[in-house]
Image (tube, rainbow, N blue to C red):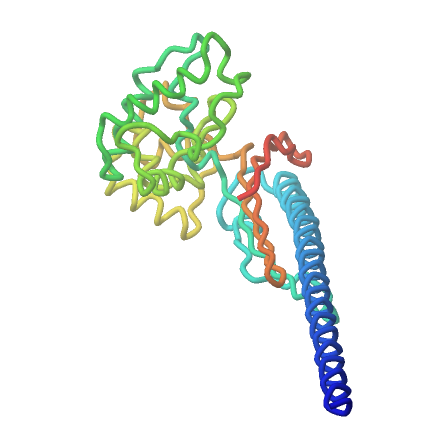
């Protein structure tokens, strides 16, 4: 009986020891899992921070490119370096285990219709500009009523202030909530419409056929497309008068609505590093041949 009792005690001791080992193992696994999760979190934060710095470097690169373009070219055209998009450019050290890929592009915002042109210095809607926007929307198969709604939104965003000084709406993406402006239509509009701090002329060297036809009533969309095709083959416009001579327009009032050089650009960039993907959008204002100033910047 004593032998049986000792055997039972020994068995219980072994079971207790096994339970202690199991509990210790579970605790150790939990600690390792927490440490692994913490390490992954820290790595992700490091990658994201590094990606943000790389993006800032890409933004500075865009500013340098635009400054050099202003110094070398009297006109702003689509055949120069700033207009070439970058896709999947490796920007990390070849020996770095974390590969970083950069993609980005610069867009001439004066190649788009500026919704600020709809409002005059008194905050009133300009009829001629409303007609131009209505024509543009018709080329894009959008309802004419949307032009008045967009104009009213811009007017409401600048109550009693000079449009050039009012913050209001900064981009097309902030125009949500307007009737007839679905997410799909907003995506389409972003290629043709912009919102800048103040009124601006359209750059004939970067504008689409739809935008040119919208601001030049005498120009049909078919003729505008032929004109743009010739332009992109190298027949760039040297001045507004050059454009009007080609289309045989004689309305002097339109001269102020056309330019061949731009001051406003939008930069979009993205850096992918491991699992971290960081994007940014920024509006740059270029004055003369100086480095452009960042007017606003936001995460994409």
Q: Position of residue 41 (x, y in %)?
A: 67, 56
Q: Residue at x 66, y 53 (%)?
A: 48
Q: Note whether residue 115 is visible.
A: yes
Q: Quadrant of residue 32?
A: bottom right
Which residue of the protein is positioned furthest toward the front in this rendering? 1
Work out whether 81 lies above or below 14: above
The one of 98 and 40 positioned closer to us in this rendering:
40
Q: Note whether residue 240 is visible.
A: no
Q: Residue at x 22, y 39 (%)?
A: 141
The one of 285 and 53 positioned closer to us in this rendering:
53
Q: Residue at x 22, y 28 (%)?
A: 144
Q: Position of residue 152 (x, y in %)?
A: 34, 18
The one of 182 and 294 positioned closer to us in this rendering:
182
Quarter the N terminus occupies: bottom right
Q: Position of residue 279 (x, y in %)?
A: 57, 48
Q: Position of residue 238 (x, y in %)?
A: 48, 37
Residue 290 is left or right of residue 81, and the answer is: right
The one of 144 and 214 positioned closer to us in this rendering:
144
Q: How many marks?
A: 0
Residue 216 is left or right of residue 143, and the answer is: right
Q: Quadrant of residue 99?
A: bottom right
Q: Residue at x 47, y 7 (%)?
A: 160
Work out whether 135 lies above or below 8: above
């Amino acid at each position: 009986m004593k032998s049986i009792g000792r055997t039972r005690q020994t068995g219980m001791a072994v079971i207790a020891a096994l339970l202690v080992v199991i509990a210790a193992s579970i605790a150790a696994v939990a600690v390792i899992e927490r440490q692994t999760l913490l390490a992954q979190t820290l790595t992700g934060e490091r990658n994201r921070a590094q990606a943000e710095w790389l993006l800032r470097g890409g933004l500075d690169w865009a500013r340098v490119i635009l400054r050099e373009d202003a110094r070398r070219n009297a006109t702003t055209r689509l055949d120069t370096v700033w207009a070439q998009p970058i896709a999947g450019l490796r920007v990390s050290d070849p020996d770095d285990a974390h590969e970083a890929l950069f993609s980005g592009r610069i867009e001439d915002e004066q190649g788009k219709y500026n919704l600020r042109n709809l409002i005059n210095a008194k905050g009133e809607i300009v009829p001629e500009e409303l007609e131009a926007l209505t024509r543009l929307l018709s080329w894009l198969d959008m309802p004419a009523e949307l032009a008045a709604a967009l104009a009213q939104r811009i007017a409401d965003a600048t109550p009693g202030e000079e449009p050039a000084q009012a913050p209001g709406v900064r981009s097309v993406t902030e125009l949500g909530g307007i009737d007839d402006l679905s997410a799909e239509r907003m995506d389409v509009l972003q290629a043709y419409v912009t919102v800048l701090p103040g009124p601006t002329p359209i750059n004939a060297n970067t504008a689409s056929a739809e935008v040119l036809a919208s601001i030049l009533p005498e120009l049909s969309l078919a003729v505008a497309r032929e004109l743009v095709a010739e332009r992109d083959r190298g027949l760039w416009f040297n001045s507004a008068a050059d454009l009007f001579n080609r289309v045989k327009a004689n309305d002097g009032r339109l001269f102020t609505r056309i330019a061949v050089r731009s001051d406003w650009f939008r930069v979009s960039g993205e850096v992918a590093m491991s699992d971290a993907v960081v994007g940014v959008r920024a509006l740059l204002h270029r004055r003369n041949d100086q480095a452009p100033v960042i007017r606003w910047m936001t995460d994409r």
